[in-house]
Every structure is written in C-alpha cells, then in structure tokens.
Image: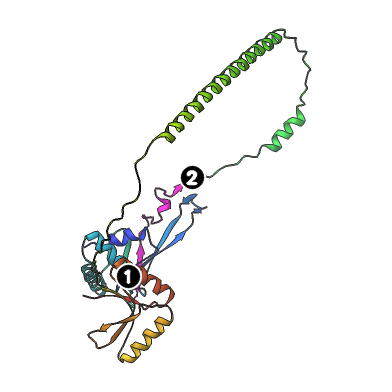
C-alpha cells in the first residue's frame, strides 16, 4: 500500500496529517513573496514540515484509507501499522525514505528525524495553477525636467482663427426636431396599445376567478389511518472514546462521576482490558464518523491523551 499517496491527498485539505505511531506532517500557510534580487514572484503556498512527537492516532488517516481501499477501519489500522514498521526498519538501517510528492526522511547520527520536503508541490488549493514568475526590471524615465526646459526655450503662440458660419447647422437642427417629434408620437401610440392589452388581461383574470368560485370540489376530509409500530434493532456501540484505565475499580467509578459532573452523561465503564485495568469512556458510538468527530473535540477541549478503542 502506497501510504504516502493518501497522506498527500489529505494535506490538500488539512493542516495536520498524523501517521499513527510514526509522526505528523504539518502545513503552514505562507503569503505571496517576491525575490528582489532575481525579480521572481512566488504565489501563496503551504510550507511542509514533520514532527515526530505528534504520533497519537486521531483517526483521520485510518478513516481515509478505509474508505479509499474499501476495507474496514480495523484492517486499515493494521495495514498502516505494517507500513510504519517497515519505515522504521529502513531508517534504523540508515536508509532514506522517499515519500512521493511529500519529501525525504532520514535519521541523523543522534537518531533525530531529518525531513527534506519537495519544492514542486503546492498544497494550497487556492493557488492551484499558479507558479513562480520571473519579470524583467522596470526602467522608469523621468522626462518632466526636459519638457520644462523645452517649453522655456520654445514659446508657443496661439493665433485666433475666425470661424466661418455654417448654415447647414440650422438644417440639421430642423431634421433632429422632426425625428424627436416622430419618436414622441410613436411612444404615445405604444403606451395606448399597452393600456388596452392590460384592460383585456384584467377582464380575462376576473372571468377565471368567477369560474373557480363556481366550481365544485371533492370532499377533502382527512381519513384516519391505523398506526404502525416498528421494532428497530439498535446498532451496537463498538467505538469508545477512552478517558482512562484504572487498576482499582473504585477509582474508575470516581472518574465516571467526575466526567458526568462535567456534562459527559454517557460516561461509563467499558470493561476490563487484557492487563486487568478497568477502562472508562467519555462516550460510545455506533458509527466511526461520530466517534472520530467526538474524539477531536475531546482532544481540543478536555484531554490530548484521549484515544479511540474499537471493541469486537
């Protein structure tokens, strides 16, 4: 599976795309810029970076892979985990990971990530189709002083010219007067025709209303229909937003009361995991989309350590 393709797709729509257990690819908007040394104009863009500390699963990438590959959420999460293991193995072997349309990842001597982003991809959708442009330097010529000097040395004289009387102007005026008189007469005739048409239309509307009032309609009294009761099976709540896990059950009960006091009325215990810890959830959902949306809200408002648990 080419996981970098799905990461690239999401970078066009989101500021942060997290690869669970590996790190996050981040974008930051940058305004248009100009390089005055090379006369190059650069369009607005998104600067791409990588943060290895942000690797908690927020469900965004897993959900997108699940929909794109037409597989379940659990299978998508397992496939992403296998890709991450392969990437880590390559990095530990001092190999370079080339992620198409994203950049190159390597490890330094002190085991820190070195990310070299691509420079030919612009993830800012509003700048689609725009590229850098080089323009020649604009040379401005100031001619004001030369013109003033020329005017001082060469005075300009104006000689009045006697205008000849043009008798044909009066005939043009008579012709225009005749045209305007004909236009006024045409407008008056047109207005009278419109008025006659409106009178005929009003009489026709009155006749239609009269016929409608005299018409006989069927009885429209509503008929009572027997009620129908349907028994719908509820979908199981298999997606849980985990708030914590406790060795002592009484501590789990206290945590539930604290969450309910904060307004999380659906907070409850969701069983004991394989380590013998009592797990507590903020809420449980039947649909993965609703669970992921709620998880993002919890990470923003309540706790960044919350995570999604999928039960069998």
Is tag 1's residue or tag 2's residue first in the polypeptide sequence?
2
Quadrant for the C terminus, please.
bottom left
Quarter of the image for residue 113 reads bottom left
209 falls in the magenta region: no
Quadrant for the N terminus, please.
bottom left
> Residue 151, how many percent across, how many down?
74, 30
- The vertical placement of 248 against 209, above or below, is below
Badge 2: residue crowd in 10 Å (few <14, some 14–19, many ≥20): few
Which stretch is magenta? 111-135
Q: Going 24% across and 76% down the picture, which residue do you hit?
A: 311
Q: Is residue 66 left or right of residue 47?
A: left
- The vertical placement of 176 against 130, above or below, is above
Quarter of the image for residue 189 reads top right
Q: Going 42% across and 59% down the picture, which residue do you hit?
A: 46
> Residue 86, how many percent across, how many down?
22, 71
Name the disc covering residue 291, or none. Answer: 1
Q: Disc 2 marks which residue? A: 135
Quarter of the image for residue 248 reads bottom left
Q: Is residue 136 left or right of residue 100?
A: right
Callout 1 touching callout 2 (CB < 8 Å): no
Helix, strand or loop under label 2: loop
Helix, strand or loop under label 1: helix
* In-front residue for pair 87/250: 250
> Residue 289, how many percent across, how many down?
31, 66
């Amino acid at each position: 599976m080419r996981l970098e393709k799905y990461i690239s797709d999401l970078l066009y729509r989101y500021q942060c795309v997290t690869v669970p257990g590996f790190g996050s690819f981040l974008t930051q908007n940058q305004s248009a810029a100009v390089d005055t040394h090379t006369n190059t104009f650069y369009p607005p863009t998104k600067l791409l970076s990588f943060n290895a500390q942000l690797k908690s699963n927020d469900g965004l990438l897993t959900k997108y892979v699940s929909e794109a590959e037409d597989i379940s959420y659990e299978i998508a999460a397992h496939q992403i985990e296998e890709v991450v293991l392969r990437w880590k193995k390559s990095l530990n072997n001092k190999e370079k990971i080339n992620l198409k349309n994203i950049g190159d990842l390597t490890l330094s001597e002190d085991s820190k990530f070195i990310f070299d982003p691509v420079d030919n991809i612009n993830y800012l959708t509003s700048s689609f189709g725009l590229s850098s442009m080089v323009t020649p330097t604009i040379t401005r010529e100031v001619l004001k002083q030369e013109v003033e000097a020329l005017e001082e040395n060469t005075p300009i004289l104006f000689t009045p010219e006697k205008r000849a009387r043009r008798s044909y102007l009066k005939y043009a005026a008579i012709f225009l007067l005749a045209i305007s008189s004909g236009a006024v007469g045409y407008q008056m005739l047109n207005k009278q025709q419109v008025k006659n048409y409106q009178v005929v239309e009003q009489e026709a509307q009155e006749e239609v209303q009269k016929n409608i009032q005299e018409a006989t309609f069927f009885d429209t009294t509503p008929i009572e229909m027997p009620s129908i009761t349907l028994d719908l099976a509820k979908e199981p709540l298999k997606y849980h937003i985990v708030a914590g896990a406790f060795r002592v059950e009484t501590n789990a009960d206290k945590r539930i009361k604290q969450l309910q006091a904060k307004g999380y009325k659906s907070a409850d215990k969701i069983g004991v995991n394989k380590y013998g810890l009592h797990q507590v959830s903020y809420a449980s959902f039947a649909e993965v989309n609703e669970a992921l949306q709620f998880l993002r809200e919890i990470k923003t408002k309540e706790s960044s350590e919350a995570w999604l648990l999928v039960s069998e």
